Amino acid sequence: MSGFEEDIIREYFEQHGFLVRAMRRIHGVGRRKNSEEAVDLMVMNPAYVESDRRPAFLLFTTELSHIERAMVISSACHGYTRLSPGLLRGSAEILKFIEKNATKEMAAYEEEMASQPAFAGIKRILVLPGLPTTEPYRSDSVALLRQAGVDGIISFRTILQDVIAKLEGALTYEKSPSLQAVRVLKLYDLLKEPQMGLFKDAAG
């Protein structure tokens, strides 16, 4: 997880009342060769109320209240592969990305966490650049991710749009250069209005 990703994802969960803690993994499988460690985020919801209602697999902000604690594992691809409009729009390209990157990310997680009993049973949320919008790519992607041990997925687009909407132009974020940069872009109207994400609200 790059510094920018970590800042944005951390801010997203903190804005919604979660306690967030960075968990560092070493020698992860499928990481960049020059990466010595990877950062996952442990998130805990102190306002969680136990119920039979489980969060949906395709997560939106409205689902966060149904999550008690989880490990957030980023595969938003900023540090792994080149972002392109084709990747973000193309169902086949996103499925290929999931096959090559997201499943390796989960393999790295499983390998590292297997030796830490304290994390047994914790929910695993994977952050992705997006999900295919057409079939059969969408269903194939969900099946592949479930098989890899993912409990829920959320798009980085969803996270980023939510953070941008909540950043206050009158405030400063000196402790986070990433948030400060986004705040300045928003202040000068250099960010486009949020558009339809790659996930669809009706999906389950």
Image (cartoon, rainbow, N blue to C red):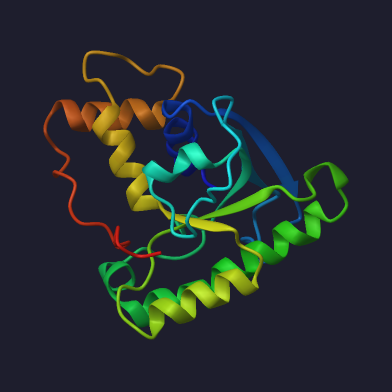
> Residue shown at 21%/20% (left/top)?
169
| Residue 153, above or below 175 | below
Left or right: residue 174 versus residue 106 is: left
> Residue shown at 69%/38% (left/top)?
23
Q: Where is residue 113 in the image (x, y as percent from the top left)?
A: 79, 52
The quarter of the picture where the C terminus appears is: bottom left
Q: Position of residue 48 (x, y in %)?
A: 56, 31
- The answer to which of 33 and 131 lies nearer the viewer is 131
Q: Which quadrant of the view contains residue 133?
A: bottom left
Instruction: Tell which residue pokes out farthest to the left in this image.
Output: 189
| Residue 196, above or below 175 | below
Left or right: residue 90 versus residue 192 is: right
| Residue 64, above or below 136 | above
- The answer to which of 33 and 184 lies nearer the viewer is 184
| Residue 157, above or below 97 | above
> Residue shown at 27%/71% (left/top)?
89
Q: Position of residue 68 (x, y in %)?
A: 60, 37
